[in-house]
Image (cartoon, grey):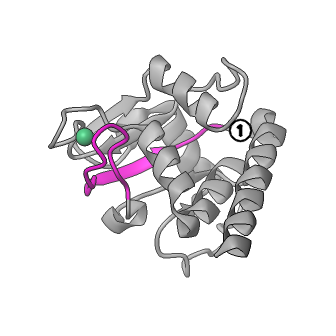
Amino acid sequence: MPAKSNAGKRSTRVVSEEVFRQVYDSPHSLPGKEKWVTSHEDVRTIEHLLGMAPKTIGAPLWVSGDTRYCPTCDRETNWLDIVASALTQVHKKDLLIKVILGDKKYVNVEAPHSIADLHCYQCKSPINDLRSFKCHNWAYARQALLDVLERVKAEESHVNEQA
Ligand SMILES: [Zn+2]
């Protein structure tokens, strides 16, 4: 299969099935000094934030980077920080939508700034060196996520009307 060029995208980019398989099969190929999986407890919190039923997310949510813990409060950085940060920043919601709802598999590689404006879920300190996050197919959660995004949009337009 010829590789489709998505080279124009600087941050999160589409990777080939082959590369994705490698990362899927071997988390050790994720960039950064450390690789880890979002804790079950935090996955439950993500589901709550996104308005999903408990246990909706079954797949492991990998993250990797050079620093695993928040330098300020020692919390382990993971998908919860990514999701929570994305939900509070309008321009990052598109990324969340693309990554979670998209048909493509996204992996962040060699782009430290691709997860910009990320903040610790616990103490809100900036997290600067998370290198990548990967997801499995979230198709099973598609409707739940669409509902969340609709709700977020509705809340935003409501706020704008009052401003
Ligand atoms: Zn922190």
Magenta-drawn segment: 118-136
Image quarter of residue 129? bottom left
The residue positioned 67% from the left and 56% from the top of the image is 97
- Which corner quadrant holds the C terminus? bottom right
Residue 84 visible here: yes
* Residue found 52% across the figure and 46% down from its top: 83
Taking the magenta stretch, the answer to whether it contains residue 92 is: no
Which residue in the rendered view is the most extreme toward the left?
A: 71
- Regarding residue 103, the answer to whether it shows in the image is no
- What residue did someone put label 1 on? 138
Residue situated furthest front in the rendering: 162
The kind of residue tagged 1 is Trp
- Left or right, residue 121 beside residue 44: left
Ligand 1 within 8 angstroms of badge 1 C-beta: no
Provide the secondary structure element on which disc 1 rests: loop
| Magenta stretch: helix, strand or loop mostly | loop
Q: Residues within 10 Å of mark 1 (few under 14, many from 20)?
A: some
Using the image, determine if residue 9 lies above or below residue 149. below
Residue 9, image x, y percentages: 54, 76
Picture residue at 84% right of the left edge, 40% below the top: 143
Q: Position of residue 115 (x, y in %)?
A: 40, 60
The answer to whether residue 119 is magenta is yes
Examine the rendered structure and indicate whether residue 45 appears above or below residue 68. above
Residue at 69% from the left image edge and 71% from the top image edge = 162
Q: How many marks?
A: 1
Look at the image and tell me in which quarter the N terminus lies: bottom right
Residue 50: image x %, image y %?
65, 38
Compared with 11, 20 (above or below) is: above
